[in-house]
Every structure is written in structure tokens, then in C-alpha cells.
Amino acid sequence: MDLVPALEEPLKKVLGPATAKVMAEHLGLHTVGDLLHHYPRRYEERGQLTHLADLPMDEHVTVVAQVADARLLTFASAKAPRGKGQRLEVTITDGSGQLKLVFFGNGVHKPHKDLLPGTRALFSGKVSVFNRRLQLAHPAYELLRGEDADETVDTWAGALIPLYPATAKLESWKLAKAVQTVLPSAQEAVDPLPGQLREGRGLVSLPEALLKIHRPHTKADIEDARSRLKWDEAFVLQVALARRRHADSQLPAVARRPKQDGLLTAFDAKLPFTLTEGQQKVSKEIFDDLATEHPMHRLLQGEVGSGKTMVALRAMLAVVDAGGQAAMLAPTEVLAQQHHRSITEMMGELAEGGMLGGAEDSTKVVLLTGSMGAAGRRQALLDLVTGEAGLVIGTHALIEDKVQFHDLGLVVVDEQHRFGVEQRDALRGKGKQPPHLLVMTATPIPRTVAMTVFGDLDTSVLDQLPAGRSPIASHVVPAADKPHFLSRAWERVREEVSNGHQAYVVCPRIGDEDDDPKKSKKKPSPEDEAEKRPPLAVLEVADQLARGPLQGLKVEVLHGRMPPDDKDAVMRRFAAGETHVLVATTVIEVGVNVPNATAMVIMDADRFGVSQLHQLRGRVGRGSAAGLCLLVTEMPEASPARQRLTSVASTLDGFELSRIDLEQRREGDVLGQAQSGARTSLRMLAVIEDEEIIAEAREEATAVVAADPDLTHLPGLRTALQALLDEEREQYLDKG
């Protein structure tokens, strides 16, 4: 029978089933290796030994003393009205003075047994005052017995105490004890870093790093360990991504070169404006990729309104020119319909392939969404399978089994963060050979995040706004502190409308029965009273505005639960200027383009994330008139939520805001699908702070994979990759 490697040993065998069960269920730790990589989040210093006569107030101290007296008292309290509350009072002395220790509730049982008069021990805690006497409440203690007592005093008092991410069922000190049990196994940890890399950068070995992170003697030990473990995370992740890029570069694809004087040339000739320098540069990068016989994998990120759709459309037309088809995947029906409408308008007669009056080089542009009628859907499917339609714009409906293409050459995914990898993968699987892939996002991504989250994609950035775009002024409206500011906000909306413009009002909630917050079992955040009321809702706010401050204006609502035809009709009326004010949820967050809309009021703005606010704001100022965005909040001035809104109001630089956002949220699992900040495969590495390490690790990883794609000569690195890429993440990268 094969022996299980020490780090793969189940915790059940080492720590017992009860402890192992709690670790698995609450912390996701299953093996010795998992526990060794569960690092302390910070360290407490017990402080040097202090005489009882010299105790400083409010400081953490460690004393060696003998128990003089211990008494268990019962008392009545709100929690124990019948006198069942318990308090243990222990008096200790070291010859220079006396000190009282107190333990309450369930915490009295163990010290009551341990701390008998005459017992000598180390006590560590924070000094406080009660009834004018110094005391330590619930101190940590270590009993001193026999010959080792003097040595214990020195090591225990001077040590840095690791504090672990813990749970109510498993306190930090229990985790520390469990780590102590498995720490000898660290010696058998296989080092994933190539020796040359480790030596070149002066990094300690992995066993030494694990020892120093869990049992540091000095702060320098912690720094050594952190530097090393950050490199592990950055390097192993970048190797995974470099292997993905390498594997992609080996796949076959059909090169798609636009023909001379074809559809793309005809389209460019129709454009009433010149492409920005940025659009021309990015288009060249994309066309160069499309001309190769390996699939393009490119991320196109650009500020809201930087003209990404134009760049994507030209790439799609180039593929149609080359005899292929192009599909654009949009996250919502509103956005799919909007893209379809704007693309057919931009193309004019070039989008009328097979129709009377269609241009010679024209193609057919079809829309495919889940709510289409049977006849329209049947025709769209037929146009795709015969190749009649060169371009298709759709939602998840494009992914269904029934949808077949004649020759799919390019997939454009809009707002990538809205799609699961499986969905992208399913669409890519519809090509006879892997199609080229262009992923677009209007959420600016800091360079290091792009190198980790999208590390298997080449990145293009559009950071110029097209000519004619207007600046957007943003202001925080403190509705609770200054109610007259909110009244002024509605006056501003009326002024914009009287000048011939339109406005959006955005709310966090719809407000129909299914959305009733009273039915929600989730507790409101205790941050402030403002957090305790339900978020403002579209239906209620629209009604209040129409009857109150915006009386006489044409106010309509738009939200995700409306029937698709109704949504489309509302958007058409708003785009045509028939509606003055559109009260909506974040359904308008991406892609909605109404140049005449100049003002936006975001209600309960503190309920939205930084990037989301930036996205929403990008819906105004899309024409020649200046844009105005008002962020309404009831949060107090000193609150983090208010500070976040002030950040958004102070800059229009999406990249700067995305850094602020990330610093506040922490990174999500950079390999997982949710970028929520809740769970992360990066335990030590912070993608904003450790920019340099990530960039260097990417270079090193690319070189290692180029020289040895299968990592034949690096068994330690192969093992680390297997540990990182559990099944779910392996699939994620495979489908990247």
C-alpha cells in the first residue's frame, strides 16, 4: 500500500474526527498541507515580563506569579436572573505586589481547576481597572512545572503569538495548538520554486518559511516568510496562466483577414467621424491576432463610452469579410436589443443582406433572445445555420443546443464579469475550430488584477474618450444632513428637462411583492440607522416623483422583471425623447446609450459598489451637453460608505476608482468565478500592494513554461499546481 505523503494526510487522522470536522466545515481545511497554509492574520506580542508593582495601564503584559487565592462566585444578571451567573476571582502575587484576575461565564471552568492556591504560572493579558483596582480579565496563562519552568518563562514571554482566522467553534488558540501538532510535517513540504529562482531572489526554503510564519521568533522572521510565501502564490498562479496561454497558442484556428474593398471598407467609408488614435491602435492589435492561425484571446477594457462597441463591430465585420460569422454575447435582453439596434443603425444598408435595397457587400444582422416569438426565433436559427446572417447579437439564448452556426469565426463577450465561464465555453464550442475570442469590459481593471484574473488573455486598453464627449460633474447629496440638497436635486432635473434634455433616476430595488425586504431573513447591516430601512424602490420612487417634485413631467419605470417587449418599448420611448425621466434599476448599467440624457440621480447610492456607480454614471454626458450625476445618501459624513461616495465624486478616472474599490473589498478568488472578496485563493498576496511581485512572477513563469511546458524537470511545481487547480479551477482555466 502506498504511503500518503505527510502534507496530504487527512486532518481526521492527525487531530481526531471532531476537530477535523469543524475545520473542514467552517474553514475548508482537510489535510495537513491545508492547515500549514492557513496562515496567522496577525501577531500579538505578550510583552516582556513585568513586576506586579510596575504594571502599566491599558497595555498587554506578561507576569510570572503564584496563585494566592481563588474564589468562585455566583451572581444574578440579565442573562442569568436566578443567580446562575458565575465569576472566578483569582488573586496572584510575585512578591512585589498583588493582582486580581477575573474569568466569567463558561470561561471559569478550566481556570477553576487549574489555578489552585500555590500554583505558579505565566499570565498574559491587558491591564484594566475595576473598582479602582488593577485587574486582568480572561488572561491567557501557562502553568509552570518542574525543571523546564525557567526556560518556559523566557520563551513564552518573549514570543510573538500568532492569531489565526478562526470561527466561533474553533478559537485561534486551538488552531495554534493544531498547527503545533502538524508543524513537523513542514519539513517534507516540496518546494515549488525552481532552485535558481529562489537563490537569485534570496528567498528562504518553503519548510523554513512555514516554520517562520507559524512560530516566528522575531518580526524579521515574519517578513522572510511572507516574502517567500507571496512569491509561491504569485508564481504558481502565473505558471497556471502561462500554461493556459501556451496551450491556446498551440490550438488551430482559421485566420480571418478582411478582403480589400469589402464590408469593412464600405462601413469605414460611411462613418461620420474619425476613429480615435486609441481605437485605431487597438483595432490593429485585434486584426493582427485575427490574421493568425491560432485563436485570439484578447481582453478589451475601456472606460465607459470609450468606443469599445465600435472596435468590436469592426472586428466582427472583418471576420464576415473573411467568410466567417461573428457572435456578440450580451448579459441582458435590454443590452442585446440596444446593441442590435445601434449596430443595424450604424451599418444602414450594409445590414440588409438578402433584402431589397441592401448594399452589394451587405450581410444580415440577427437578434436572438429567450423571449422572441417562435416564428422570429425559427428564422434567426435558420439564418445562422445557413450562413445568411453574418452577425448575431444575443443573450444566453445563443448558447442553447439548438443554435448552430455555418462557420463561427469570432465570439465577442460584452461585460465579461456577468458571464460564467461555462457559458463562454459553450458558445466557443460552436465553431468547427476554436473561434477567436474578444472579451470586453467597461469596468477598468488595475494592471495586476488583469494579470491575475485575466492572465490568460492579452490585454488592450482604450483610455481615450471619442471627440464630442462631455465631462460629467458628480456631487454627493447628503439627504439626511441637508434635506434641502435633495429638493435642489429635483429642481436640477426639472432644469435639465426644460432645456430639452432627459434624466435617469436609479434605485437599488424594484419594489414589487417578490422583492419585499420584510420577507428577507437577512439581517440589516448595523452600520447606521440608514442601513436598517429597506433600500429605496423603483416603483415607489417613480410614484412619489410623479405626484411630487417632478409632477407634470413624463416619468416611466424600467426594471428586470418587466416583460421583454415592455422593456424594449420603454427604452424606445426614452431614446426617442418621449419620456422625460426614466426611473430604473441597474438594468441600465451597461451599454444603454441615450445621448440626450444628461442627468442621473442615484438614490441610496451607498448601496452600490464603486465600479457600479462609475458604470451607471457613464450613461450620462454621452452627447455634446455636459453630464450631471447626483449621489443621494443618508449615511453620516464620517462613515466609510460616505467616504466611498466622495471618492467616486472626486474622480472620473475608472482605473483610480477600481484601485479604491479593490482596496476596500479585497480580492475575490482570482481563479474562481465570483469576484466577491469573500473567498480567495490568495492567502498572502494582495494584488494591489504586491504589483511588483506579480509582474516579476509573470515574467519568470512565462520563461519557465516556454522552456518546459509540461514542467517535466520541476516535480515540486507540478505538485503545487495540482493543489492550486482543484477540479473547479482547472475547468475555469481550461475554459478561460
Image: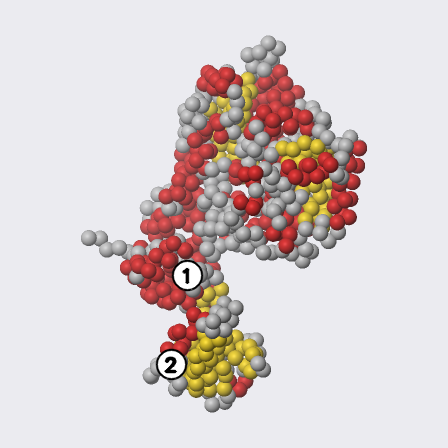
In the rendered image of this protein, does residue 557 appear above or below residue 167?
Answer: above
Residue lying furthest left: 1
What residue is drawn where x is 54% and y is 33%?
Answer: 331
In the displayed structure, does residue 182 sit left or right of residue 277? left
In the rendered image of this protein, does residue 280 appear above or below residue 192?
Answer: above
> Residue 600: image x %, image y %?
70, 39
The answer to which quarter of the image holds residue 191 is bottom left
> Residue 14: image x %, image y %?
30, 61
What residue is drawn where x is 41% and y is 61%?
Answer: 169
Type of amino acid at the residue the image marks with label 2:
Leu
Viewer can see residue 370: yes
Q: Nearer the viewer, mark 1 or mark 2?
A: 1
What residue is drawn where x is 46% and y is 87%?
Answer: 94
Helix, strand or loop for disc 1: loop
Proximity of marks 1 and 2: CB atoms separated by less than 8 Å? no
> Residue 671: image x %, image y %?
45, 45
Q: CA distance from mark 1 to mark 2?
A: 28 Å
Q: Which mark is residue 169?
A: 1
The answer to which quarter of the image holds residue 623 is top right
What residue is drawn where x is 42% and y is 50%?
Answer: 236
